[in-house]
Image (tube, rainbow, N blue to C red):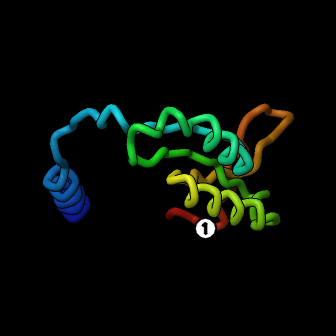
Amino acid sequence: MRAGVRILLVTLFILFGFLRSASAAAATDYGMHVLRPEEIETIAAQTTELRQESSAPLYVTLPFSLDDTKDLDRWRTAFRVAKENNIVPLVRLVTRFDTEANAWAVPISTKSCN
């Protein structure tokens, strides 16, 4: 039990030791969340006027599901368009969408945590 407490204390020290004070992002930073990689082209066109005043990138969160591994060309295209338009894609890993439950499927672990 002592080793577990020691590990917890060291982890907390490391986490809180490297934290910096929180501050608001600059007013020129923008971000969006989209559901499909093809939407990056639409976002690039719609935000051109908004971002002309600043060279700051636009941050876009994209969910990458297990089904997306079958069609990587659309992702390559999305990343190329993002690079050309100063868009930073933030890829969020997800499972498969369960239409019956109307929610993301719960991941199934093949390894035991014990």
**x%, y% of residue 104?**
71, 41
Residue occupying image coordinates x 44% and y 37%: 30
Amino acid type of the residue tagged 1 in the rendering: Lys
- In the rendered view, would you say 58 is above or below 76? above
| 62 sits to left or right of 20 | right
Question: Where the N terminus falls, by quadrant?
Answer: bottom left
| 105 sits to left or right of 28 | right
Q: How many marks?
A: 1
**x%, y% of residue 112?**
58, 65
Q: Which residue is mark 1?
A: 111
Residue occupying image coordinates x 53% and y 34%: 49
**x%, y% of residue 44?**
61, 44
Residue occupying image coordinates x 39% and y 46%: 56
Closer to us: 7 or 91: 91
Closer to us: 60 or 21: 60
Residue occupying image coordinates x 21% and y 65%: 3
> What secondary structure is marked by label 1?
loop
- In the rendered view, would you say 111 is above or below 20? below
**x%, y% of residue 93?**
61, 54
Closer to us: 46 or 104: 46
Closer to us: 71 or 50: 50
What is the crowding at mark 1: few (fewer than 14 residues within 10 Å), some, or many (at least 20)? Answer: few
